[in-house]
Image: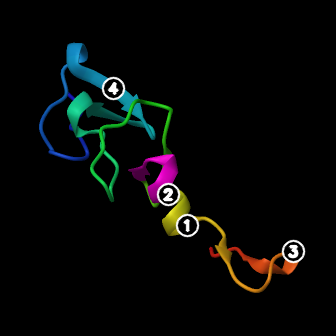
Amino acid sequence: MPKCPNCQKEVYFAEKVTSLGKDWHRPCLKCEKCKKTLSAGSHAEHDGKPYCHNPCYSALYGPKGFGRGGSESHKYDK
């Protein structure tokens, strides 16, 4: 029986949500930053952890702005 990556309890077939290659309980699939409940496939991933697209993932890992605009005003962090 697979274990939920969040709570480490067994995930039964009736309560299973598959995302990021793992089986989760529906309420356990939450944004790592804001804790909003996510649906499978409609979220971003960083280091194997789920994040909501906006605002959390884009604020943490998206482009950072600087300068006066134009093509030189974005910095992409890895």
Q: Secondary structure at mark 1?
A: helix
Q: Position of residue 41 (x, y in %)?
A: 50, 32
Q: How many marks?
A: 4
Q: Which mark is residue 17?
A: 4
Residues tagged 3 and 1 counted as in contact (Cβ below 8 A): no
Disc 1 from disc 4: Cα separation: 25 Å
Q: Nearer the viewer, mark 4 or mark 3?
A: 3
Q: Does residue 48 lie above or below 71 as drawn? A: above
Q: Which badge, 4 or 3, comes first in the chain's sequence?
A: 4
For label 4, the crowd category at 10 Å Cα-Cα, with few meaning under 14, some 14 to 19 and many 20 or more, is many
First reached walking from the N terminus: tag 3 or tag 1: 1
Question: Considering depth in this image, is 2 or 45 the residue closer to the camera?
Answer: 45
Identify the residue shown where x is 33% and y is 59%: 33
Looking at the rendering, the stretch of residues picked out in magenta corresponds to 49-56
Q: Is residue 6 left or right of residue 66?
A: left
Q: Secondary structure at mark 3?
A: loop
Q: Quadrant of residue 34?
A: bottom left
> Marks 3/1: CA distance?
20 Å
Q: CA distance from mark 2 to mark 1?
A: 6 Å
In the picture of the structure, the residue carrying the numbered disc 3 is 70
Question: Which one is in front in this view, the residue at disc 1 or the one at disc 4?
Answer: 1
